[in-house]
Every structure is written in C-alpha cells, then in structure tokens.
Image (tube, rainbow, N blue to C red):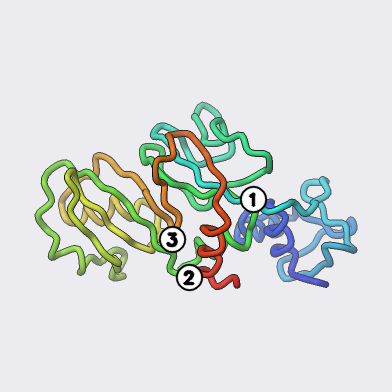
Amino acid sequence: MEERVQKILAAAGVASRRKCEELIAQGRVKVNGKKIKLGDKADAELDVITLDGEIIQQEKKAYYAFNKPKGYITSLKQKGKKVIMDLINTEEKVFPVGRLDENTEGLLLLTNDGELANRIMHPRYQTYKTYHVVLDRKFKDYNKLTSITLDGKKIKLKSYRKLPEGLEIIIHEGKKHIVKRIFAKLGYKVQELKRVQIANIKIGNLGKGKTRRLTRKELNELKSLLKMR
C-alpha cells in the first residue's frame, strides 16, 4: 500500500514526521534510487527507501519513559555537551518526543513510532504535561494564572495547585520555555522545573537517568487519548 514517504520514515523510527519532512526537503531521501519531494508516495513493502544512502527498514515499535537529569540536553549528539543518549541503552533505536531544557529535569518519552510522536507534539491533540515548579519567592498571583497572554495568544492552563514547595501546573502548550515565560510574565524566576507527567504517563519513582518500558495498559490509554485506536 502506498503512503506518503514521510509517514513511512516516521513509522520506521527515523524521527518524528515533521523532522522526516525536513529530511525529504533537504534532498536526503530517495525511493528506488531517485530523489523525492514532499508529498511523494511509496510502498514500504515493495520500494527501496534510503536516507543518506542507507536503506530504511521497519522496526518493531518501542515505547519508553525516561527520567532526564539536569545538565543534559535533549539531543542525539552535540559536541562539548552531555546528551541524554549518553544515558540511554535500549534494545531498539529510539528518539525523544519533544525536549526539555538543559537545566530542566523529568519525564521524556522515547520511541521509534513517528506517528505517535507527531500526535503528542501536535497542538490538535492537546497532550497535557504536568510540571512541578519552584520559584525564586513565594507565589501569590494564582488569580492571574488564568489570564496569561504570550505572543498575543492567551495561554490556557488545565489546572494548578500549591505544593509544599512551589506549585504544580498542567498545560498542553509546547512552545519553547513556555513554563519559564509564564512565570517571568508575572515577575517570577523559575529556579527548579520538573516534568512529572505527559498525558497518562507518570514519572513515578523512576530514577534519574533511568528508562522503563511503558506497560501495555499505559500504551493503550495513551493511544486512545491520541485517537490512534
């Protein structure tokens, strides 16, 4: 069955669909020896698809939770920096879904399922993320959290609550530095930031720098939330 090549690449675990589109636009993908363009289709079972000359093969899908420590960047490789892949040793080749800043810790999902990764990151599916935030001083502006505007757009928080230290917020916005920017707008500086949940997946007692496979129940619930079943 023919499908758009970026979808085939994403399903093979190359990267998210958006990143695969970039690879095609850069002219790095060929089908049966011919360079393709965005929108072209292929049959994963009949056609030979290559990236930078290497044949792309379908992999068994894998899904992991990873507890990212501070001091690591969400990248596969970067000279002079500690990257999360230094800590990850999975049977399958996986990539992170989204990213966390170098000085932010907590939950990242790892997978080779490009379709699932794309849906988690796409605003249409409103995948909620839960963060624990410690600020430079006691937070007193809870009434203002429902009316934050950034870049001309109102930011919608699903919920928020006080914690013994700091507070918890739940938000589906995925813009860069979104949590830090929210509190900066109110005159606060984020000192510690930890993501503890993505959709239904919780970090729980997973150790820093450790990975675990998602359970069948977790994965089924996640796919249901993302309308994949």
- Would you say 10 lies left or right of 150 here? right
Q: Which mark is residue 142?
A: none
- 1 or 3: tag closer to the N-terminus: 1
Where's residue 177, x and y in %? 35, 51
Residue type at tag 2 = Tyr
Q: Quadrant of residue 129?
A: bottom left
Dot 3 lies on which element? loop
User: Could you tell me which residue is drawn at 50 percent across and 61 percent down?
Assistant: 121
Q: Can you name the residue that lies furthest to the top here?
A: 80
- Would you say 32 lies left or right of 192 here? right
- 2 or 3: tag closer to the N-terminus: 2
Gap in angstroms between the C-alphas marked 2 and 3: 10 Å
| Discs 1, 3 touching: Cβ within 8 Å | no
Where's residue 199, x and y in %? 43, 61
Q: Quadrant of the N terminus?
A: bottom right
- 2 or 1: tag closer to the N-terminus: 1
Where's residue 168, x and y in %? 25, 53
What residue does disc 1 label?
62
Residue type at tag 3 = Ala
What residue does disc 3 label?
199
Dot 2 lies on which element? helix
Dot 1 lies on which element? loop
